[in-house]
Structure formats: structure tokens, C-alpha cells
Image (cartoon, rainbow, N blue to C red):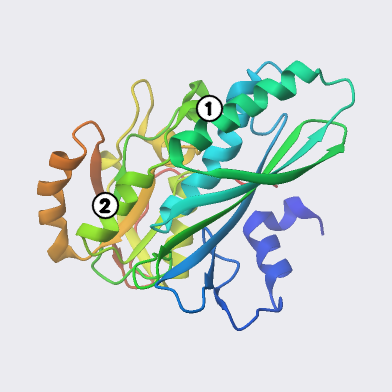
Amino acid sequence: MNLSDIGEDALVQRLTQGLPLGANVIAGAGDDCAVLRTNGRSDVTLFKTDCVVEGVHFTADTPPVLVGRKALARVISDIAAMGGQPQHGVITLILPPPTSVHYVEELYVGLKTLALDFGVSIVGGETSRGPLIIVSVSLIGKAPAKRWISRSGAKVGDRIFVTGKLGGSIRGHHLHFEPRVAAAQWLVSNSTIHAMMDLSDGLGQDLPRMAKASHLDFKVKEQDLPANDGCTKLHAWSDGEDYELLFAVPARAASKLNTEWPKQFPALLLTCIGKFVPLGEGESPRTSAAGWDHF
């Protein structure tokens, strides 16, 4: 058996099963971030790590400023998806020795610019040689202790929403996207959010993850998927790297949310694409494509 036989999710499940967790761990592996109890405070700590790899997340001709930006933006997006505020990051660089110093400096320009935009302090890191360029970012954030959002809290009847438009990210969106920190924080403060995550691997991969974590199934109307210009509904379902918010709200809150959202975020589309249902009653779009899986 090799990695291509089992896929990413099954591998993660095998590796994380039985890992030691201390008393201050509220939620470990299995969500967008780990959630840690902070003694004597009203906030919890969110902790996340992610990486971008040459040939997987960017190409050799991608401007280094955008490589650095994407590396940090991906992790900020995860913090946002749990209703959090990003705070402190450390950066690990794996670099082939022939890499120019100018390339690395420009990569850090992208990192620093986005860090300033979102109030993130870059507090350290590590460097090592390797056969290709890898940028790994670990980020700490915070969220109110009673308002952090998991992907596992959806309930039967909850309406499923996504922000923005989906599909076609490879045309440039994956390098320029804005993490939805402000939108997520507004949602947790002004609506009832039962579950939330960011769309990094495509709706066809991430929505089933949310449903599985919540022990539910879902019904999605293919015609309601918000696709970017030039993209089909298949692209919207399966392309990945959208970095939009996917979340569940009770039916009673959906109408108010649809009314209030355009007042707060007039330039950001919000779409109800379906609802959560009991196990065995689900219905997916006709496509069998399932989003991105590394293996």
C-alpha cells in the first residue's frame, strides 16, 4: 500500500490517531486549526501550520513576492475560518543553494506586506537547504473562548453558504486572494454559525469533510453554485484553492443573514448552495469530481 492508494484524509487520520494531547488542548488535529486553552483569559489560542511547495502550489516562474504572500495568506485563511484573529508567525525556508539572494528577499517582501495588512508579527523561523523551494508558515491567533467555530457543529436543516465565487483559481486567484478575516469575524458576532471552514481543496472535497465531521449528509443544488467568469459548475465544485468561507447557519437565521450581508460586504457575494440533511439522504452535484487530494 502506498499514499496514492489511501489519499490525504486517510493518511492524516492514521497519523493523528492516538497522538498525545495535554490538558490545555481543546481541539487537536482534524480542524482548520488546533484550539488551545489559555489559562485565566477570555480567549482561546488558535495554532496552524501550512506550506507551499514549488511545483505544487507555485511554479518556478511565479514572482517570489506572490510566493511569500500566498504562504502566509493560506494560514491566515485557516485562522479566519475559525472566527479568529491572526497574531504571530514563524517562517521556515527550504532553499536550493543556487537560489538568488534577491529571490529570497522578494519572497520576504510578500510575507511582510501581507503581515502588515493583517497585523501579524513575524517572530522567527528557520532555513535549510533542499532540492526545491518550500515555504512553511506556523501561525498563532486568538478567538473568543465562547465564539470559536469548528467544522463539526453543523445540524440537520442548516443552510450551507459560501462567500465569493468559485473555480478557476489557477488563473491567478490562488496568488492574490484576500483571507476572509473581517467577514468571518462579522459572521460569528452577528449571526448563528454552527460550522465553518475555508475552501482550500475545493467544495467537492471540503463540504464532505464538514458533513463527515458533523455526522451528516448534504444536498447541494448544482445550479446554485457561484462560479467565476469562464468557469463551469464543475470547476466551482472541484477546482480548489478558492480560499472562500464555507459555513452552516440554522434556517431561521438565513433570511436575516441574506438581508444584512450586502450592507456590510457589498462587494462580496454570499450564496446559499444547499442544506445539511441526515445521513443517507444526501444529494451531490452530478459530477463525481472530488476536489484536490495531494496523493
* Residue picked out by circle 1: 175
Residue 275 appears in the rendering: no
Image quadrant where residue 126 sits: top right
Q: Quadrant of the N terminus?
A: bottom right
Image quadrant where residue 118 sits: top left
Q: Nearer the viewer, mark 2 or mark 1?
A: 2
Q: Position of residue 48 (x, y in %)?
A: 59, 56
* Residue picked out by circle 2: 186
Task: Say which residue appears at 76% left-offset and 53% top-offset.
Answer: 3
As drawn, the label of residue 209 is none
Task: Say which residue appears at 64% left-offset and 33% top-offset.
Answer: 57
| Residue that sits furthest to the bottom in the current view | 23
Sequence order check: which comes first, mark 2 or mark 1? Answer: 1
* Direction from residue 229 to residue 29 in the image, left or right: right
The answer to whether residue 43 is above or below residue 105 is below
The answer to whether residue 220 is above or below residue 116 is below
Q: Nearer the viewer, residue 184 or 160?
A: 184
Q: Nearer the viewer, residue 171 or 131?
A: 131
The crowd level at tag 1 (other Cα within 10 Å; few <14, some 14-19, many 20+) is: many
Q: Amino acid at mark 2?
A: Trp
Q: Amino acid at mark 1?
A: Leu
Q: Position of residue 284 (x, y in %)?
A: 37, 53
The crowd level at tag 2 (other Cα within 10 Å; few <14, some 14-19, many 20+) is: some
* Direction from residue 70 to residue 180 in the image, left or right: left
Q: Position of residue 211 (x, y in %)?
A: 42, 64
SS at mark 2 in the image: helix
Q: Position of residue 203 (x, y in %)?
A: 43, 46
Task: Say which residue appears at 70% left-offset and 61% top-offset.
Answer: 11
SS at mark 1 in the image: helix
| Cα–Cα gap, marks 2 and 1 | 25 Å
Q: How many numbered circles are shown?
A: 2
